[in-house]
Image (cartoon, helix red, strand yellow):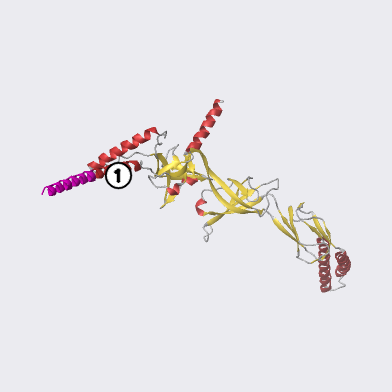
Amino acid sequence: MKIKKNLLSMALALGGAGLLSLSLSGCGSSNSAQAKDTKDAKPEVVNAVPVETAKASRGQIAASYNGTATLTADHEAQVAAKTSGVLIKLFVEEGQAVKAGQVLAQLEQDTARAKLAQAAAQMRKADASFTYNEKAIQKQLIAQKDFDQAKYDMQNLRAAYEEARLNLQFTTITAPVDGVIAERSVKLGNLIQVNQNLFRIVGMDPLQAVLNVPERQLGILKSGQPVTLEADALPGQKFTGDILRIAPVVDSASGTFRVTSEFHDKTGTLKPGMFGRVSIVYDQRADALTVPRSALVEEDGETAVFVVEKGVDKPADAKKDGDKKDDAKKSDAKVADAGKGDDKKPAAPGLVAHRKLVKIGYSDGDKVEIRSGIDEGTQVITVGRNAVRDGTAVQVLNAEKDKQIAQTKTDGAKG
C-alpha cells in the first residue's frame, strides 16, 4: 500500500513538470513569432513611374501651312528640227546656259542652198513673164485669162522662193528661250528629220512649287504671302519666296485648290525636279504659352496633358482589431529603433501626375500653343506619358539635371 502511494506521487510530479514545460514552450514560441514578424516588417514602398518633363513657357509662335511639292521651271522648251539634214556642228552641251536666239547646232546647207537657187530662178522667170503679160493686157494683145494665170504663177513661185529661203535658215538651230541645256538628244553626223527633238531647255530662275491645299485654307492664304522652302537634297538650307497666284476654284474630286509659289535663286543652287517642303506663314503670336508637341495626349476627341504636382499624404485606415493595432505600434516602434543607427536620408516628397484638359492653338514645329487649361511654369510630362494615369506616382528623371544646369549658369554669372 505504501508503494502505490509513492508511485502516484511520482506520476503527479511528472505531470506537473510536463504542463509547466508546455506552457513555457508556448510562450517562447509566441514571443519568437512576434519577433520574426517585427523583423520582417518593412515600410510600404510606392513604385513611381520614371518620366521626363518640360515647363510650359511663353514665346513666339507662327501659324503656317506646311506641304510638299516638286520644283518646276517657270518655262521649258523642246527644241525640234524644222527641216531635215545631217548634223555637222554642235555649239552647246548639257548644263550650259543659253540665251534666246543663240545658235545651238548646224545642219548641212548644200541641199537647202540648191533648192533656194532653183526657187529664185523660177521666181525671176515668173516675174519676167508677168511683166510682159502686164504690158500686153494694156494693149489687149492677150486675153484676161492668160494675164490672170501669169499673175498667179508669179505669186506661187514667190511663195516657193520664200519657203526655200526659210528652209535654208532652219538649218541653223537656235534657242527659243533663255535657260540651261537640260538634255541633248542628238550626235554629230545624225540625219535629222523634221520635228525630231534635238535639245531640251529649262529655265532655272524663277522656279515654282505647286501645292494642293485643303479648301478650308482658301480664305487664309493670299497672294504675296512669304513662303519658305527646304529641299531634301540640300539639308540645312532654306530658300524664301512668295505666293505667286492662287487658283480661283476648288477641285471637287480632291477638295483642294492650287497654290503656286515662286522662288528666285540667283546662285543656281535649286534645280527643277527637286523635292521640297514648303511652309507658308500666315499669322504670328509674340507671347504665346507653348509646350512641346510630345506632351499632348489625344483621347476620345479631347486634348490633354499630364502635369506633375506634389502628392498629398493620405491617413492610414484604422484597424478594427485592438490587439492588431497594439501589435502594429510595437512593430513600428521596433523598426524605428532599429533604424536609428542608419544614415539613410528622409524620402523626398512624392510627385503625382494629374491629367489636365487643354485647348490648343497654333503649332510650329515641335511647339504647340496652349490657349487654356494650364498656366505658365507648369511641369508637363513629355516622356513616359503613355505609362501614367491620373494620380499615378512619378519620378522626374531630368529634375536633377535641370538643377545642375541652373547651378552652372548661376556660378558662371557670379564668376
Q: Is residue 48 above or below residue 256?
A: above
The image position of residue 359, as x and y in percent, is 43, 45
**Residue 247 visible here:** no
Q: Amino acid at mark 1?
A: Ala
Farthest top residue in view = 414
Magenta stretch in the rendered image: 1-23
Farthest front residue in view = 2
Q: Residue at x 17, y 46 (%)?
A: 10
Q: Is residue 142 above or below residue 229?
A: below
Q: Is residue 14 above or below residue 163?
A: above
SS state under label 1: helix
Is residue 22 within the magenta segment? yes
Q: Quadrant of residue 115?
A: bottom right
Magenta span dominant secondary structure = helix
Is residue 259 within the magenta segment? no
- Answer with left or right where residue 289 lies relative to residue 140: left
**Residue 54 visible here:** yes
The image position of residue 77, as x and y in percent, is 71, 58
The image position of residue 402, as x and y in percent, is 50, 36
| 121 and 101: which is toward the camera | 101
Q: Residue at x 32, y 36 (%)?
A: 334
- Answer with left or right where residue 76 lies relative to residue 229: right
